[in-house]
Amino acid sequence: MKKIELLLPAGNLDNLRAAVNNGADAVYLGMSKFNARMGADNFNENNISSIIKYCHDRNVKVYVTFNTLIKNTEIKDWLKQISIVNSAKADAIIIQDVCMIEILKKNFPKLPIHLSTQSAMMNSQSIPKGVERVILPRELSISQVKNISKNFETEAFVHGALCISYSGICLFSSMVGDRSGNRGRCAQPCRKKYNNKYLLSTKDLCLLEKIPELIEAGISSLKVEGRLKSPLYVGTVARIYRKYIDMYYDKKFKVDSKDINTLKLVFNREFTTGFLYNDSIVDPRQPMNRGLFIGVAKDGVLLLREPLKVGEGVGVWINDKVIGFKIKSIVLIDNKKVTSVKAGDKIKFNYDGPVYKTSSDLTVDLGDDIKIKKEIVQISDVKTPEIKNKENDDSLKLFAKVYNKKSAIATNADVIYYDILKDDCAKVKEMIKQGKFFVYTPRVLSDEEVILIKDKIDEVNPDGVLVSNPGLLKVLDKKYEIHLDYNFNVTNDIDIDSLNGIPIVSPELTLSEIKGLKNKQLICLVHGDSVLMTTKEPIKAPELIDESDRHFKVRKYHSYNEILNCNQIGLFNKIHDLVDLGVKYFFIDTNKEPEKFVRIYKKILSGVKFVDKKIKKGYTTGHYYRSVE
């Protein structure tokens, strides 16, 4: 029986040493460009060969991350960086953009490709040919993981920080803070206060006790998050998970609570088993490391649940604040001074509230130093497909998403998008007298739901489909005209040419970047709501209000919640800037009076003078006029 792989993060040299020398079978790391943790120290062409040799000499594989979205002007540099790690003998690369697979296979036929969790491969039908491994979304249930793992090599997160949004389709940091999670620069708005609580702040994943079930589910690799964490964290987590993986194969699996406590001590925001086991993943208290809970101090006395020593750090949780300090002295309640106490002892304490141990004398073995030998990196010539200019010769058209029968009938758009899950979908189709009738689909679909939605589409028999989940592209009849929702993250010409359908391009593109696209068979969002987050976590509040008094609406759809931007996009007269670039198709998404806004934009596009000074107040132009990191 082949043992399951233990995969550890390496954000810098010391973290890599900590992982390699404490039980990792493989490490994943990023170069100085194009990786989803640009805040880590990362690696470069001067040291990557030495790094990989160091790992290989110790029987540890190296996977290099290139899991960000790629813009037209970056494609050659992206491929150059991959050429460098290929020549350095990396064991695999991790990518987000599935449209790049064919190019990679042509240029680097022997280099395995792993699909990042940023690719949001939620079902078997989504997974493209040409990849050796799929890193699964953290929102899947254990039964879904088992099902996908029957036919594909899979990797699953088992420990560390969680995203509240499905990875790869989160625009919150981008739209609110101009730093894109899809570009490795997430500003973590989920760790901020909303409605005076940290409603989006997630706990940390810990699946140590679930190792037997994960192995038996057919997963190939257990992955630990943490390229921005300390060497102590990386080494400790590696050592403990290594211990219990080996114990499983030796048929001696039994988790010692002391090891769980050690994991808590090195870093945790409370542990959860996550969506894999239908557990809640949010803790609305402070979004910071808890440490190990050691007791509640009351009336100047702390009854200890865990040992404590002089020199260790503690944090006391008092209402919404945490007071942290090092223990300089310990006094028992009989006034006796000691240097250490055990569980069950009572000591004098100056604060009342829950107390956590936040630091101790834990250490980690980093092993040998890494000797960096500067080598000449062989960069092979990379070939990219020739992209020809492809203008859109069609007339200017408006495509509108509507949310009820009344709006569908009243909205005089060239294409109406209507919810395939609505009971009246087929009836509404018959009532549409002008324009084309498309259905739109959920973003999140399981294997079974892909088939159910496909059957519903065939039953309604629309003119076309606005596809929001890539799994549908494999099963839909070729007779349907296909449009692609913007969660497909289309950012370059290769994406447009490769995908089977006309895409609503990424809202993260600027006007100048859209101008640079040679293929103008595309759609731009010009008015309405932007979906910032798609999350499986229940959110009971109808809106989230941040500390700047911005209101983010929450809406339930299908099996998930969507968080909408505080301001709708509204280009109004500025839509002419897109027309001047050769864009002909425009997307409107608003549940309030879509018929009114279609009329307004038709008027603007027809050349009739329209004064938008008053109406455009409160709207945003998104990233069209401001770039995102």
Image (tube, rainbow, N blue to C red):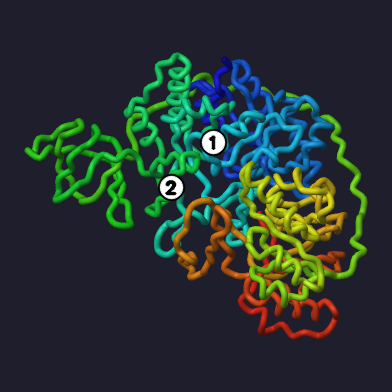
Answer few, some or many: residues within 10 Å of disc 1's Cα (few below 14, many 20 plus, some between 14 and 19): few
Q: Residue at x 68, y 33 (%)?
A: 114
Q: Residue at x 80, y 27 (%)?
A: 109
Foreground of the two, 497 or 186: 497
Which marked residue is nearer to the observer: mark 1 or mark 2? 1
529 is higher (above) or lower (below) than 250: below
Q: Residue at x 20, y 32 (%)?
A: 343
Question: Does residue 216 appear anywhere in the picture?
Answer: yes
**Residue 137, picture quadrant:** top right
Question: Does residue 66 appear anywhere in the picture?
Answer: no
Residue 612, percent from left and from top: 72, 82
575 is higher (above) or lower (below) than 257: below
Image disc number at residue 121? none
Residue 468, percent from left and from top: 69, 53
Helix, strand or loop status at disc 1: helix
What residue is pinned by disc 2? 280
- With 151 as the anchor, is 392 left or right in this view? right
259 is higher (above) or lower (below) than 206: above
Question: From the image, which quarter does the C terminus lie in?
Answer: bottom right
Q: CA distance from mark 1 to mark 2?
A: 18 Å
231 is higher (above) or lower (below) than 489: above
